[in-house]
Image (cartoon, rainbow, N blue to C red):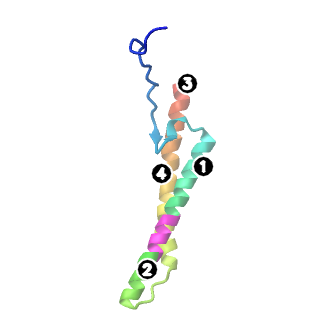
Amino acid sequence: MTPASQQQAVSPAPKTGIFLGIPLGDLGWFASLLMGAATGFIAFFATTFLGIVGIMIYNSTTHSNVSYALSYQRGGLIVGVVTLLAAWGFLGSLWVKRMFRR
């Protein structure tokens, strides 16, 4: 056996496309669809929540009566759809690149 000081450390191959521990470059087409849809839903619900809180603060400070439906229609829906399409475009391009690399 050789001493540990003489052994060379083997570094793992660098992984590309990792975001928060998720290997985005290694996803299949169905996993890419699910991840994109989850991103869109998260964006929709987060924007809708912030819109409702913002309208609530606005209504209470100005004593006006702005409809809470605006947070869904002009906030959450638009941001959710744009985020969904952007995520599907990005993850789909990663999947297509990986298919052509093989």
At a point 60% along the width and 49% down the height, the residue shown is: 34
- The amino acid type, in three-letter code, at marker 2 is Ile
Mark closer to the chain start, 1 or 4: 1
| Cα–Cα gap, marks 3 and 1 | 23 Å
Percent position (x, y) of residue 1? Answer: 49, 8
Residue 37 vs 8, above or below: the answer is: below
What residue is shown with label 1? 34
- Is the C-beta separation of discs 2 and 4 under 8 Å? no
Q: Nearer the viewer, residue 77 or 14?
A: 14
Mark closer to the chain start, 2 or 4: 2
What residue is shown with label 3? 102
> How many other residues sit within 10 Å of disc 4, few (<14), some (14-19) or many (≥20)?
some
Percent position (x, y) of residue 68? Answer: 50, 80
Disc 2 secondary structure class: helix
Farthest residue, direction right: 30
Mark closer to the chain start, 2 or 3: 2
| Cα–Cα gap, marks 3 and 4 | 25 Å
At a point 51% along the width and 36% down the height, the residue shown is: 25
Highlighted range, magenta: 45-52
- The amino acid type, in three-letter code, at marker 3 is Arg
What residue is shown with label 4? 86
Residue 62 as seen in the image, left or right of residue 39: left
Percent position (x, y) of residue 29? Answer: 60, 40
Farthest residue, direction left: 62
Disc 1 secondary structure class: helix
| Cα–Cα gap, marks 1 and 4 | 13 Å
What residue is shown with label 2? 55
